[in-house]
Every structure is written in C-alpha cells, then in structure tokens.
Image (tube, grey):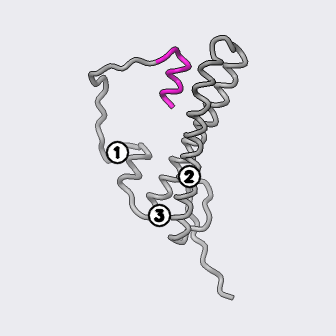
C-alpha cells in the first residue's frame, strides 16, 4: 500500500542508504514473522489472516481514492487512473491466496473459520 499512498501524496523518491534498522526477536508481533515461525494449521491460519488484511486494505484504498477523486478530480483523476489497475491486481492476488489457504486448511481438516479461531469439525458417519 505504500506505493499507492506515495502517489496520493505527490510521489516518492529512492534513497540508496538504509534509514531504518529492524531487529527481529521472538517478541515481535508481526504476522509475517509469526507465520515464518509457525507450521501446519497455525501457519495457514496466520497466512489467511494476512491475506484478509491485505484485501481489506485494497478495498479501503480504493474507497479513499474514489473519495479524493470526487473531491478534486483535477488533482487525483490521473493518479486514480494509474492506481486502479494496481488495486485490482492486488485484490486478485489476495483472493487467490485466500482460496489456496482455504484449500490447504480443508485438506488438514479445518472446515470452518470464525475470526482467527480454528474449528475442526469431525466428519459425521452415516
């Protein structure tokens, strides 16, 4: 989402030197770090959550873009024209990841999700 935000705020510039150091420790709360440290169902649940959040961000960004474009089309119409296809690609990629994660969870016996909680449903015998 940073490139989209940069376009909305008159662009971005490349700076070749690092401006930030990021220390990774077991206390980090980043979902991507948690996914890397997890396995099996827990990893898939975190990946599902990450994809949902990215999908949510793309929808929010599109709404904000539309709001800005309606407010000041002279300033934002070109930005909107350039960013809409990028948002569509992101949404499509996140939808694919959500479905792939869901398929893997089904294979592992997780048949329903409620929020971030997994519920494993036993197969009924007939």
Q: Residue at x 49, y 21 (%)?
A: 6
Residue 89 rendering spot, x and y as whole percentages: 56, 40
- The reply to whether the magenta stretch includes residue 97 is no
Q: Residue at x 52, y 14 (%)?
A: 10
Main SS category, magenta section: helix
Residue 18 rendering spot, x and y as whole percentages: 28, 25
Which stretch appears magenta? 1-11
Give the answer, above or below, for where 38 lies relative to 5: below
Pick the residue in front: 120 or 75. Answer: 75
User: Which residue appears farthest toward the top when viewing the image?
Assistant: 74
Q: Secondary structure at mark 3?
A: helix
CB atoms at circles 3 and 2 under 8 Å apart?
A: no
For mark 3, what is the residue? 41
Residue 52 rendering spot, x and y as whole percentages: 57, 47
User: Which residue appears farthest toward the right when viewing the image?
Assistant: 70
Q: Residue at x 63, y 17 (%)?
A: 76
Q: Total of numbered circles in the picture?
A: 3
Q: CA distance from mark 3 to mark 2?
A: 18 Å
CB atoms at circles 2 and 1 under 8 Å apart?
A: no
For mark 1, what is the residue? 27
- In this image, 68 relative to 37: left or right? right
| Of the two numbered discs 3 and 2 in the rendering, the one whose residue sits closer to the viewer | 2
Q: Residues within 10 Å of mark 1 (few under 14, many from 20)?
A: few
Q: Residue at x 58, y 35 (%)?
A: 87
Pick the residue in front: 44 or 114. Answer: 44
Q: CA distance from mark 2 to mark 1?
A: 30 Å
For mark 2, what is the residue? 96
| Of the two numbered discs 2 and 1 in the rendering, the one whose residue sits closer to the viewer | 2
Pick the residue in front: 109 or 7. Answer: 7
Q: Image quarter for residue 38?
A: bottom left
- The reply to whether the magenta stretch includes residue 3 is yes
């Amino acid at each position: 989402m940073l490139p989209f935000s940069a376009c909305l705020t008159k662009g971005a510039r490349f700076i070749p030197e690092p401006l930030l150091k990021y220390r990774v420790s077991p206390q980090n709360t980043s979902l991507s770090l948690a996914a890397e440290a997890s396995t099996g169902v827990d990893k898939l649940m975190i990946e599902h959550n990450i994809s949902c959040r990215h999908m949510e961000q793309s929808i929010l960004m599109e709404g904000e873009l539309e709001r800005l474009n309606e407010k000041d089309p002279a300033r934002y119409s070109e930005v909107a024209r350039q960013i809409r296809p990028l948002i569509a690609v992101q949404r499509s990629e996140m939808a694919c990841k959500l479905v792939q994660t869901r398929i893997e969870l089904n294979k592992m016996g997780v048949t329903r999700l409620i929020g971030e909680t997994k519920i494993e449903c036993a197969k009924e015998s007939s």
